[in-house]
Image: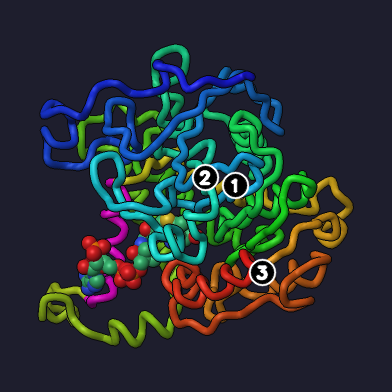
Amino acid sequence: MDWQISEDTVPSAPVTEADARSMAGRPPATGAWRDGDPVGDRSFAAFGLMRTEGGALLPGFRLAYESWGELNAARDNAVLILHALTGDSHVRGPAGPGHPTAGWWDALVGPGLAIDTDRWFVIAPNVLGGCQGSTGPASIHPDGEAWGSRFPYLTIRDQVAAQVRLADALGIDRWAAVVGGSMGGMHALEWAVGTPERVERLAILSSPPINTADQIALNSVQLEAIEIDPRFAGGEYYDAAPGEGPHRGLALARRMALLNYRSPTELNQRFQRSWQSGVSPLGHGGRFAVESYLDFHGNKFTRRFDANTYIRLVEAMDSHDVGRDRGGVEEALARVTATTLVLGIDSDRLFPVDGQHRIARSVPNTLDGAESVVLHSDFGHDGFLIETAAVAHHLGRLFTA
Ligand SMILES: CC(=O)SCCNC(=O)CCNC(=O)[C@H](O)C(C)(C)COP(=O)(O)OP(=O)(O)OC[C@H]1O[C@@H](n2cnc3c(N)ncnc32)[C@H](O)[C@@H]1OP(=O)(O)O
Ligand SMILES: N[C@@H](CCO)C(=O)O
Protein backbone atom coordinates (compact mmCIF):
# COMPACT_ATOMS: atom_id res chain seq x y z
CA MET A 1 0.00 0.00 0.00
CA ASP A 2 1.24 3.49 -0.74
CA TRP A 3 -0.15 5.13 2.35
CA GLN A 4 0.24 5.18 6.05
CA ILE A 5 -1.28 7.05 8.92
CA SER A 6 2.10 8.15 10.07
CA GLU A 7 3.28 10.19 12.98
CA ASP A 8 4.44 12.95 10.75
CA THR A 9 0.92 13.52 9.49
CA VAL A 10 -0.70 13.57 12.91
CA PRO A 11 -0.07 16.87 14.61
CA SER A 12 1.22 16.30 18.08
CA ALA A 13 1.06 19.64 19.82
CA PRO A 14 -2.27 20.93 21.08
CA VAL A 15 -3.02 24.55 20.46
CA THR A 16 -1.39 26.66 23.16
CA GLU A 17 -1.76 30.07 24.71
CA ALA A 18 0.97 31.13 22.34
CA ASP A 19 -1.19 30.31 19.37
CA ALA A 20 -1.49 33.44 17.27
CA ARG A 21 -5.23 33.20 17.17
CA SER A 22 -5.70 33.53 20.91
CA MET A 23 -2.66 35.77 21.42
CA ALA A 24 -3.97 38.52 19.26
CA GLY A 25 -7.67 37.88 19.71
CA ARG A 26 -7.89 38.54 15.99
CA PRO A 27 -8.04 36.17 13.05
CA PRO A 28 -4.65 34.90 11.91
CA ALA A 29 -3.41 35.54 8.39
CA THR A 30 -5.32 32.47 7.23
CA GLY A 31 -8.38 30.65 8.49
CA ALA A 32 -6.88 27.27 7.58
CA TRP A 33 -6.64 24.44 10.06
CA ARG A 34 -2.94 24.17 10.80
CA ASP A 35 -0.63 21.50 12.15
CA GLY A 36 -0.60 22.09 15.86
CA ASP A 37 -4.29 22.91 16.00
CA PRO A 38 -6.45 20.34 17.79
CA VAL A 39 -7.06 17.32 15.56
CA GLY A 40 -10.68 17.00 16.65
CA ASP A 41 -12.41 14.00 15.09
CA ARG A 42 -10.11 13.79 12.07
CA SER A 43 -8.03 10.91 10.86
CA PHE A 44 -5.33 11.37 8.25
CA ALA A 45 -4.10 9.27 5.37
CA ALA A 46 -0.87 10.17 3.62
CA PHE A 47 0.00 9.35 0.03
CA GLY A 48 2.99 9.61 -2.25
CA LEU A 49 3.53 11.39 -5.53
CA MET A 50 0.56 12.61 -7.52
CA ARG A 51 0.57 14.03 -11.03
CA THR A 52 -2.36 16.33 -11.73
CA GLU A 53 -4.35 16.38 -14.96
CA GLY A 54 -2.48 19.57 -15.82
CA GLY A 55 0.86 17.77 -15.43
CA ALA A 56 1.96 19.33 -12.13
CA LEU A 57 3.60 17.14 -9.53
CA LEU A 58 2.60 17.01 -5.89
CA PRO A 59 5.40 15.23 -4.06
CA GLY A 60 2.90 13.83 -1.60
CA PHE A 61 -0.39 14.72 -0.02
CA ARG A 62 -2.63 13.80 2.81
CA LEU A 63 -6.39 13.67 3.16
CA ALA A 64 -8.13 14.40 6.43
CA TYR A 65 -11.31 12.44 6.89
CA GLU A 66 -13.89 11.54 9.48
CA SER A 67 -15.86 8.34 9.80
CA TRP A 68 -18.89 7.04 11.61
CA GLY A 69 -20.23 3.51 12.03
CA GLU A 70 -18.41 0.25 11.34
CA LEU A 71 -17.19 -1.27 8.11
CA ASN A 72 -18.78 -4.74 7.92
CA ALA A 73 -16.94 -7.95 7.16
CA ALA A 74 -18.07 -7.94 3.52
CA ARG A 75 -16.84 -4.33 3.21
CA ASP A 76 -20.00 -3.48 1.31
CA ASN A 77 -21.65 -0.94 3.62
CA ALA A 78 -19.35 2.04 3.01
CA VAL A 79 -20.86 5.41 2.14
CA LEU A 80 -18.84 8.34 0.85
CA ILE A 81 -20.12 11.84 1.66
CA LEU A 82 -18.52 14.71 -0.25
CA HIS A 83 -18.69 18.29 0.95
CA ALA A 84 -19.50 21.55 -0.80
CA LEU A 85 -17.10 24.39 -1.58
CA THR A 86 -16.49 25.59 1.94
CA GLY A 87 -17.49 22.47 3.81
CA ASP A 88 -15.15 19.92 5.32
CA SER A 89 -15.01 16.45 6.80
CA HIS A 90 -17.11 17.46 9.80
CA VAL A 91 -20.43 16.14 8.58
CA ARG A 92 -21.56 15.39 12.08
CA GLY A 93 -20.61 16.50 15.56
CA PRO A 94 -20.37 19.75 17.45
CA ALA A 95 -18.12 22.69 16.75
CA GLY A 96 -15.24 22.64 19.15
CA PRO A 97 -11.51 22.25 19.34
CA GLY A 98 -10.33 21.56 15.79
CA HIS A 99 -13.73 22.06 14.19
CA PRO A 100 -14.72 25.62 13.35
CA THR A 101 -18.30 24.66 12.54
CA ALA A 102 -20.79 22.10 13.77
CA GLY A 103 -21.54 19.14 11.52
CA TRP A 104 -23.09 20.41 8.32
CA TRP A 105 -25.41 17.41 8.01
CA ASP A 106 -25.94 16.60 11.68
CA ALA A 107 -29.63 16.11 11.03
CA LEU A 108 -29.08 13.58 8.26
CA VAL A 109 -26.18 11.38 9.29
CA GLY A 110 -26.19 9.43 12.54
CA PRO A 111 -27.83 6.54 14.37
CA GLY A 112 -31.39 6.10 13.11
CA LEU A 113 -31.12 9.04 10.69
CA ALA A 114 -31.51 9.05 6.91
CA ILE A 115 -27.92 7.89 6.52
CA ASP A 116 -28.04 5.52 9.44
CA THR A 117 -24.62 5.00 10.96
CA ASP A 118 -25.91 1.90 12.77
CA ARG A 119 -26.03 0.34 9.31
CA TRP A 120 -23.62 2.27 7.14
CA PHE A 121 -19.94 3.02 7.52
CA VAL A 122 -19.71 6.68 6.53
CA ILE A 123 -16.50 8.34 5.37
CA ALA A 124 -16.19 12.06 4.71
CA PRO A 125 -12.85 13.44 3.46
CA ASN A 126 -11.80 17.05 3.25
CA VAL A 127 -11.07 17.64 -0.41
CA LEU A 128 -7.53 17.74 -1.84
CA GLY A 129 -6.65 21.44 -2.03
CA GLY A 130 -8.79 22.14 1.04
CA CYS A 131 -7.85 23.91 4.24
CA GLN A 132 -9.35 21.73 6.96
CA GLY A 133 -6.64 19.11 7.28
CA SER A 134 -6.08 17.91 3.72
CA THR A 135 -3.09 19.13 1.74
CA GLY A 136 -3.74 22.48 0.14
CA PRO A 137 -2.19 25.88 -0.50
CA ALA A 138 -1.90 26.63 3.22
CA SER A 139 0.08 23.42 3.79
CA ILE A 140 3.82 23.35 4.03
CA HIS A 141 5.81 22.71 0.86
CA PRO A 142 8.85 20.43 1.20
CA ASP A 143 11.00 23.57 1.26
CA GLY A 144 9.49 24.50 4.63
CA GLU A 145 7.41 27.45 3.40
CA ALA A 146 3.69 27.45 2.69
CA TRP A 147 2.72 26.29 -0.79
CA GLY A 148 0.76 29.49 -1.32
CA SER A 149 0.26 30.37 -4.96
CA ARG A 150 2.65 27.56 -5.96
CA PHE A 151 0.02 24.98 -5.07
CA PRO A 152 -0.98 23.35 -8.35
CA TYR A 153 -4.16 24.03 -10.24
CA LEU A 154 -6.52 21.13 -9.57
CA THR A 155 -9.54 19.79 -11.42
CA ILE A 156 -12.53 18.04 -9.92
CA ARG A 157 -11.08 14.87 -11.48
CA ASP A 158 -7.77 15.38 -9.67
CA GLN A 159 -9.63 15.65 -6.39
CA VAL A 160 -11.57 12.48 -7.13
CA ALA A 161 -8.33 10.72 -8.08
CA ALA A 162 -7.09 11.56 -4.57
CA GLN A 163 -10.31 10.17 -3.08
CA VAL A 164 -9.89 6.98 -5.11
CA ARG A 165 -6.51 6.50 -3.46
CA LEU A 166 -8.15 6.93 -0.07
CA ALA A 167 -10.79 4.32 -0.94
CA ASP A 168 -8.08 1.93 -2.14
CA ALA A 169 -6.11 2.48 1.03
CA LEU A 170 -9.15 1.77 3.19
CA GLY A 171 -9.88 -1.38 1.19
CA ILE A 172 -13.22 -0.15 -0.13
CA ASP A 173 -13.65 -1.46 -3.68
CA ARG A 174 -17.23 -0.37 -4.09
CA TRP A 175 -19.23 2.29 -2.29
CA ALA A 176 -22.74 1.37 -1.19
CA ALA A 177 -23.43 5.03 -1.93
CA VAL A 178 -21.62 8.19 -2.95
CA VAL A 179 -23.46 11.33 -1.87
CA GLY A 180 -22.55 14.93 -2.65
CA GLY A 181 -24.08 18.38 -2.68
CA SER A 182 -22.93 21.34 -4.78
CA MET A 183 -19.18 20.92 -5.37
CA GLY A 184 -19.46 17.55 -3.60
CA GLY A 185 -22.05 16.57 -6.19
CA MET A 186 -19.50 17.30 -8.92
CA HIS A 187 -17.12 14.91 -7.22
CA ALA A 188 -19.85 12.31 -6.75
CA LEU A 189 -20.78 12.52 -10.42
CA GLU A 190 -17.15 12.08 -11.43
CA TRP A 191 -16.94 8.97 -9.26
CA ALA A 192 -20.02 7.50 -10.91
CA VAL A 193 -18.93 8.35 -14.46
CA GLY A 194 -15.22 7.60 -14.10
CA THR A 195 -15.53 4.42 -12.03
CA PRO A 196 -19.14 3.22 -12.41
CA GLU A 197 -18.28 -0.24 -11.11
CA ARG A 198 -17.36 1.29 -7.73
CA VAL A 199 -20.64 3.15 -7.07
CA GLU A 200 -23.80 1.25 -6.19
CA ARG A 201 -25.97 4.24 -5.27
CA LEU A 202 -25.48 7.88 -6.12
CA ALA A 203 -27.02 11.09 -4.78
CA ILE A 204 -26.43 14.34 -6.64
CA LEU A 205 -27.87 17.30 -4.77
CA SER A 206 -27.99 20.86 -6.13
CA SER A 207 -25.15 20.16 -8.49
CA PRO A 208 -24.72 20.51 -12.26
CA PRO A 209 -23.16 18.30 -14.98
CA ILE A 210 -20.97 21.22 -16.08
CA ASN A 211 -20.07 24.59 -14.63
CA THR A 212 -21.70 26.95 -17.12
CA ALA A 213 -20.47 30.31 -18.41
CA ASP A 214 -22.84 31.98 -15.95
CA GLN A 215 -21.35 30.09 -13.02
CA ILE A 216 -17.79 30.75 -14.20
CA ALA A 217 -18.64 34.45 -14.48
CA LEU A 218 -20.03 34.55 -10.94
CA ASN A 219 -16.89 32.85 -9.70
CA SER A 220 -14.53 35.11 -11.63
CA VAL A 221 -15.59 38.26 -9.79
CA GLN A 222 -15.11 36.52 -6.46
CA LEU A 223 -11.59 35.53 -7.37
CA GLU A 224 -10.85 39.06 -8.51
CA ALA A 225 -12.13 40.40 -5.16
CA ILE A 226 -9.51 38.29 -3.38
CA GLU A 227 -6.69 38.99 -5.79
CA ILE A 228 -7.04 42.78 -5.68
CA ASP A 229 -6.82 42.87 -1.89
CA PRO A 230 -3.32 44.32 -1.35
CA ARG A 231 -2.88 41.93 1.56
CA PHE A 232 -3.31 38.99 -0.78
CA ALA A 233 0.21 39.79 -1.98
CA GLY A 234 0.04 37.44 -4.94
CA GLY A 235 -0.94 34.62 -2.59
CA GLU A 236 2.15 34.89 -0.36
CA TYR A 237 0.51 36.18 2.82
CA TYR A 238 1.17 33.35 5.26
CA ASP A 239 3.81 35.28 7.16
CA ALA A 240 1.50 38.23 7.70
CA ALA A 241 0.71 39.21 11.26
CA PRO A 242 -2.56 38.01 12.76
CA GLY A 243 -5.41 39.98 11.29
CA GLU A 244 -3.34 41.15 8.33
CA GLY A 245 -4.14 38.46 5.81
CA PRO A 246 -6.40 39.08 2.79
CA HIS A 247 -9.54 39.01 4.93
CA ARG A 248 -11.20 41.89 3.18
CA GLY A 249 -10.99 40.33 -0.27
CA LEU A 250 -12.00 36.92 1.01
CA ALA A 251 -14.94 38.35 2.94
CA LEU A 252 -16.09 40.22 -0.15
CA ALA A 253 -15.88 37.03 -2.21
CA ARG A 254 -17.98 35.27 0.41
CA ARG A 255 -20.56 38.06 0.40
CA MET A 256 -20.89 37.77 -3.36
CA ALA A 257 -21.16 33.99 -3.14
CA LEU A 258 -23.79 34.12 -0.42
CA LEU A 259 -26.07 36.09 -2.73
CA ASN A 260 -26.16 33.04 -4.96
CA TYR A 261 -26.59 30.66 -2.06
CA ARG A 262 -29.82 32.34 -0.95
CA SER A 263 -32.88 33.50 -2.87
CA PRO A 264 -34.40 36.95 -3.36
CA THR A 265 -37.58 35.70 -1.67
CA GLU A 266 -35.75 34.71 1.50
CA LEU A 267 -33.68 37.89 1.72
CA ASN A 268 -36.67 40.12 0.97
CA GLN A 269 -38.95 38.42 3.47
CA ARG A 270 -36.35 38.07 6.17
CA PHE A 271 -34.76 41.51 6.08
CA GLN A 272 -37.26 43.62 4.20
CA ARG A 273 -35.85 47.17 4.30
CA SER A 274 -35.10 47.10 7.99
CA TRP A 275 -32.24 49.04 9.56
CA GLN A 276 -29.47 47.44 11.54
CA SER A 277 -29.46 48.53 15.20
CA GLY A 278 -32.18 51.07 14.48
CA VAL A 279 -29.81 53.53 12.78
CA SER A 280 -31.09 54.90 9.50
CA PRO A 281 -29.07 54.02 6.41
CA LEU A 282 -30.75 56.92 4.62
CA GLY A 283 -27.90 59.37 4.98
CA HIS A 284 -27.43 58.86 8.72
CA GLY A 285 -24.54 56.43 8.68
CA GLY A 286 -26.54 53.27 9.40
CA ARG A 287 -26.78 50.08 7.38
CA PHE A 288 -29.61 48.02 6.08
CA ALA A 289 -29.92 44.79 8.09
CA VAL A 290 -29.20 42.71 5.01
CA GLU A 291 -25.89 44.54 4.57
CA SER A 292 -25.00 43.73 8.15
CA TYR A 293 -25.93 40.08 7.58
CA LEU A 294 -23.65 39.81 4.55
CA ASP A 295 -20.89 41.60 6.40
CA PHE A 296 -21.25 39.21 9.32
CA HIS A 297 -21.01 36.12 7.12
CA GLY A 298 -18.10 37.53 5.13
CA ASN A 299 -16.09 38.23 8.25
CA LYS A 300 -17.02 34.98 9.93
CA PHE A 301 -15.84 33.09 6.88
CA THR A 302 -12.33 34.52 7.08
CA ARG A 303 -11.90 32.89 10.48
CA ARG A 304 -12.33 29.41 9.04
CA PHE A 305 -11.09 29.56 5.47
CA ASP A 306 -7.99 30.34 3.47
CA ALA A 307 -7.93 32.68 0.47
CA ASN A 308 -5.60 30.64 -1.75
CA THR A 309 -7.68 27.57 -0.99
CA TYR A 310 -10.82 29.39 -2.03
CA ILE A 311 -9.18 30.20 -5.36
CA ARG A 312 -8.00 26.65 -6.04
CA LEU A 313 -11.38 25.13 -5.14
CA VAL A 314 -13.31 27.61 -7.25
CA GLU A 315 -10.97 26.91 -10.16
CA ALA A 316 -11.64 23.21 -9.68
CA MET A 317 -15.38 23.86 -9.85
CA ASP A 318 -14.83 25.86 -13.04
CA SER A 319 -13.02 22.84 -14.51
CA HIS A 320 -16.15 20.74 -14.03
CA ASP A 321 -17.47 19.28 -17.25
CA VAL A 322 -18.42 15.67 -16.81
CA GLY A 323 -18.40 15.24 -20.59
CA ARG A 324 -14.88 16.55 -21.20
CA ASP A 325 -12.90 14.02 -23.28
CA ARG A 326 -15.82 11.62 -22.98
CA GLY A 327 -17.89 12.51 -26.01
CA GLY A 328 -19.99 15.13 -24.23
CA VAL A 329 -22.21 15.34 -21.19
CA GLU A 330 -24.95 12.97 -22.30
CA GLU A 331 -22.56 10.24 -23.39
CA ALA A 332 -20.65 10.52 -20.12
CA LEU A 333 -23.79 10.37 -17.98
CA ALA A 334 -24.95 7.27 -19.84
CA ARG A 335 -21.98 5.42 -18.27
CA VAL A 336 -23.46 5.68 -14.77
CA THR A 337 -24.74 2.34 -13.50
CA ALA A 338 -25.62 3.43 -9.95
CA THR A 339 -29.17 3.75 -8.72
CA THR A 340 -29.33 7.52 -8.68
CA LEU A 341 -31.15 10.25 -6.82
CA VAL A 342 -30.97 13.66 -8.48
CA LEU A 343 -32.34 16.54 -6.43
CA GLY A 344 -32.51 20.30 -6.91
CA ILE A 345 -34.10 23.31 -5.21
CA ASP A 346 -36.56 25.44 -7.15
CA SER A 347 -35.08 28.75 -5.91
CA ASP A 348 -31.42 27.81 -6.54
CA ARG A 349 -29.91 30.64 -8.55
CA LEU A 350 -26.38 29.21 -8.45
CA PHE A 351 -27.14 25.81 -9.94
CA PRO A 352 -30.67 26.09 -11.36
CA VAL A 353 -32.69 22.89 -11.66
CA ASP A 354 -32.13 22.73 -15.43
CA GLY A 355 -28.74 21.24 -14.64
CA GLN A 356 -30.21 18.56 -12.40
CA HIS A 357 -32.88 17.71 -14.99
CA ARG A 358 -30.12 17.34 -17.56
CA ILE A 359 -28.40 14.80 -15.32
CA ALA A 360 -31.65 12.91 -14.69
CA ARG A 361 -32.43 12.72 -18.41
CA SER A 362 -29.23 10.86 -19.26
CA VAL A 363 -28.40 8.75 -16.22
CA PRO A 364 -29.97 5.37 -17.00
CA ASN A 365 -31.19 4.27 -13.56
CA THR A 366 -32.63 7.18 -11.59
CA LEU A 367 -35.21 6.89 -8.83
CA ASP A 368 -37.53 9.33 -10.57
CA GLY A 369 -37.08 8.72 -14.27
CA ALA A 370 -35.96 11.54 -16.54
CA GLU A 371 -36.81 14.31 -14.06
CA SER A 372 -34.89 15.53 -11.06
CA VAL A 373 -36.69 15.79 -7.74
CA VAL A 374 -37.34 19.51 -7.27
CA LEU A 375 -37.81 20.71 -3.70
CA HIS A 376 -39.73 23.87 -3.09
CA SER A 377 -37.75 26.07 -0.73
CA ASP A 378 -37.07 29.76 -0.33
CA PHE A 379 -33.53 28.99 0.86
CA GLY A 380 -32.08 28.77 -2.64
CA HIS A 381 -28.91 26.78 -3.21
CA ASP A 382 -28.29 26.36 0.54
CA GLY A 383 -31.60 24.49 0.69
CA PHE A 384 -29.68 21.21 0.43
CA LEU A 385 -28.09 22.10 3.79
CA ILE A 386 -31.17 23.61 5.42
CA GLU A 387 -34.19 21.60 4.21
CA THR A 388 -33.08 18.55 6.13
CA ALA A 389 -36.49 16.88 6.52
CA ALA A 390 -37.16 16.85 2.78
CA VAL A 391 -33.61 15.88 1.88
CA ALA A 392 -33.78 13.09 4.49
CA HIS A 393 -36.97 11.79 2.92
CA HIS A 394 -35.38 11.49 -0.52
CA LEU A 395 -32.08 10.09 0.75
CA GLY A 396 -34.16 7.53 2.65
CA ARG A 397 -35.71 6.43 -0.64
CA LEU A 398 -32.25 5.96 -2.12
CA PHE A 399 -30.85 4.07 0.84
CA THR A 400 -33.73 1.62 0.86
CA ALA A 401 -33.62 1.14 -2.93
C1 LIG B 1 -21.41 21.23 2.84
C2 LIG B 1 -21.22 22.62 3.23
O1 LIG B 1 -21.58 23.46 2.52
S1 LIG B 1 -20.53 22.97 4.68
C3 LIG B 1 -20.56 24.68 4.84
C4 LIG B 1 -21.85 25.09 5.42
N1 LIG B 1 -22.20 26.28 4.87
C5 LIG B 1 -21.83 27.40 5.42
O2 LIG B 1 -21.21 27.48 6.45
C6 LIG B 1 -22.23 28.56 4.68
C7 LIG B 1 -22.48 29.75 5.59
N2 LIG B 1 -23.56 29.48 6.43
C8 LIG B 1 -24.78 29.52 5.97
O3 LIG B 1 -25.07 29.85 4.85
C9 LIG B 1 -25.81 29.12 6.96
O4 LIG B 1 -25.29 29.27 8.23
C10 LIG B 1 -26.32 27.70 6.83
C11 LIG B 1 -26.67 27.42 5.39
C12 LIG B 1 -25.31 26.66 7.22
C13 LIG B 1 -27.48 27.62 7.77
O5 LIG B 1 -28.33 28.69 7.53
P1 LIG B 1 -29.09 29.47 8.66
O6 LIG B 1 -29.24 28.64 9.88
O7 LIG B 1 -30.30 30.00 8.00
O8 LIG B 1 -28.06 30.59 9.06
P2 LIG B 1 -28.09 32.13 8.60
O9 LIG B 1 -27.65 32.28 7.20
O10 LIG B 1 -29.39 32.70 8.96
O11 LIG B 1 -27.00 32.82 9.51
C14 LIG B 1 -27.22 32.96 10.87
C15 LIG B 1 -26.19 33.90 11.44
O12 LIG B 1 -26.37 35.20 10.86
C16 LIG B 1 -26.43 36.18 11.90
N3 LIG B 1 -27.27 37.27 11.48
C17 LIG B 1 -28.57 37.22 11.15
N4 LIG B 1 -29.00 38.47 10.85
C18 LIG B 1 -27.94 39.30 10.97
C19 LIG B 1 -27.77 40.71 10.80
N5 LIG B 1 -28.76 41.50 10.44
N6 LIG B 1 -26.54 41.23 11.03
C20 LIG B 1 -25.51 40.43 11.41
N7 LIG B 1 -25.63 39.10 11.60
C21 LIG B 1 -26.84 38.53 11.37
C22 LIG B 1 -27.01 35.41 13.07
O13 LIG B 1 -26.67 36.06 14.27
C23 LIG B 1 -26.36 34.04 12.94
O14 LIG B 1 -25.09 34.08 13.55
P3 LIG B 1 -24.33 32.72 14.01
O15 LIG B 1 -23.90 32.03 12.75
O16 LIG B 1 -23.17 33.19 14.83
O17 LIG B 1 -25.33 31.92 14.78
N1 LIG C 1 -23.03 27.13 1.67
C1 LIG C 1 -22.30 26.24 0.83
C2 LIG C 1 -22.62 26.64 -0.56
C3 LIG C 1 -21.80 26.03 -1.62
O1 LIG C 1 -22.44 24.86 -1.98
C4 LIG C 1 -20.83 26.34 1.10
O2 LIG C 1 -20.42 27.39 1.57
O3 LIG C 1 -20.09 25.41 0.89
Task: Say which element carries label 3.
Answer: strand
> Residue 301 appears at what percent x and percent y?
32, 52
> Residue 135 appears at what percent x and percent y?
48, 30
Q: Is mark 2 within 8 Å of ligand 1?
A: no
Query: Which mark lies nearer to you, 3 or 2?
Result: 2
Q: Of residues 1 and 216, which is closer to you in this image? A: 1
Residue 201 found in image quarter: bottom right
Query: Is residue 291 rendered magenta in the image?
Result: yes
How far apart are the two marked residues, 1 and 3, measured between alpha carbons?
A: 20 Å
Q: Which residues are magenta?
A: 288-303
Q: Could you tell me which residue is drawn at 70 percent across and 49 percent down? A: 190
- Residue 257 appears anywhere in the view: no
Q: Earlier in the sequence, mark 1 or mark 2?
A: 1
Location of mark 2 (residue): 123
Above or below, comparing residue 374 to residue 158 in the picture: below
Location of mark 1 (residue): 78
Q: Label 3 crowding class (10 Å Cα cut-off): few <14, some 14-19, many 20+?
A: many
Q: Quadrant of the C terminus?
A: bottom right
Query: Is residue 150 rendered magenta in the image?
Result: no
Q: Which mark is residue 126?
A: none
Labelled pair 1, 2 in contact (Cβ < 8 Å): yes
**Horizontal relation, residue 275 to residue 164: left or right:** left
Q: Which mark is residue 342?
A: 3
Task: Say which element carries label 2.
Answer: strand
Q: Earlier in the sequence, mark 3 or mark 2?
A: 2
